[in-house]
Amino acid sequence: MQIRITVPCQHARLRELTTTIDDVLHQHGVAQQLRHDVRLIAEEVACNVVDHGGADQEPHTIVTDVSARDGQLIIEFRDDGNAFDPLSATAPDVDADIHDRPIGGLGLHLVRELADSLTYRREGGHNVLRVTLRDKRAA
């Protein structure tokens, strides 16, 4: 399985991205829990791109590649927004009182917790985030 989905960096288009990914994974027999995790990851990553990647007001896109091989599900997000390495972001103190925590950072924390591995690179003016999850069906 290998698919590519390209959507504009607009909140109104993010549902299209997540629904398309979920539909394709469902068609390929991916378990509901893994599809749920992928959907959460896609929502968090894409929302961050829309919210923080386009301060220049130019139109931007998110290209998402999803593939399955060797018992792994690989999701690669590529956007042409501002450079941002989500792996360098400070992890939130989830044990702190809710009133003492700064706003933000929980989405990236969730992505880190759900993924088996994450890599980031800046390539030709694009942020490239690769998220790998183990497909337990193939284990």
Image: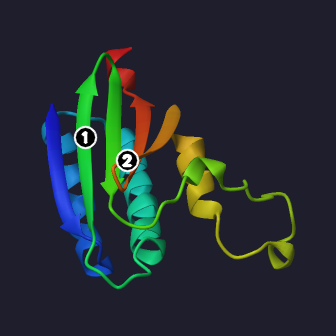
Quadrant into which the N terminus falls: top left
Residue 66 - label: 1
Q: Secondary structure at mark 1?
A: strand
Residue 36, how many percent across, how many down? 38, 49
* Residue drawn at the location 31% of the way across and 36% of the way down: 31
Q: Which residue is mark 2?
A: 38
Relative side of 89 to 99, left or right: left
Q: Earlier in the sequence, mark 2 or mark 1?
A: 2
Q: Amino acid at mark 2?
A: Val
Residue 96, how many percent across, how many down? 86, 64
* Residue drawn at the location 66% of the way across and 56% of the way down: 89
Q: Amino acid at mark 1?
A: Val
Q: Does residue 2 sit above or below 49 in this rendering?
A: above
* Residue drawn at the location 45% of the way across and 76% of the way down: 51
Quadrant into which the C terminus falls: top left
Relative side of 90 to 58, left or right: right
* Residue drawn at the location 76% of the way across and 74% of the way down: 102
Separation of residues labelled 2 and 1 (CA atoms): 10 Å
Which is in the foreground here, disc 2 or disc 1? 1
Residue 23 - label: none
Between 107 and 36, the residue placed more toward the observer is: 107
Disc 2 + disc 1, Cβ < 8 Å = yes
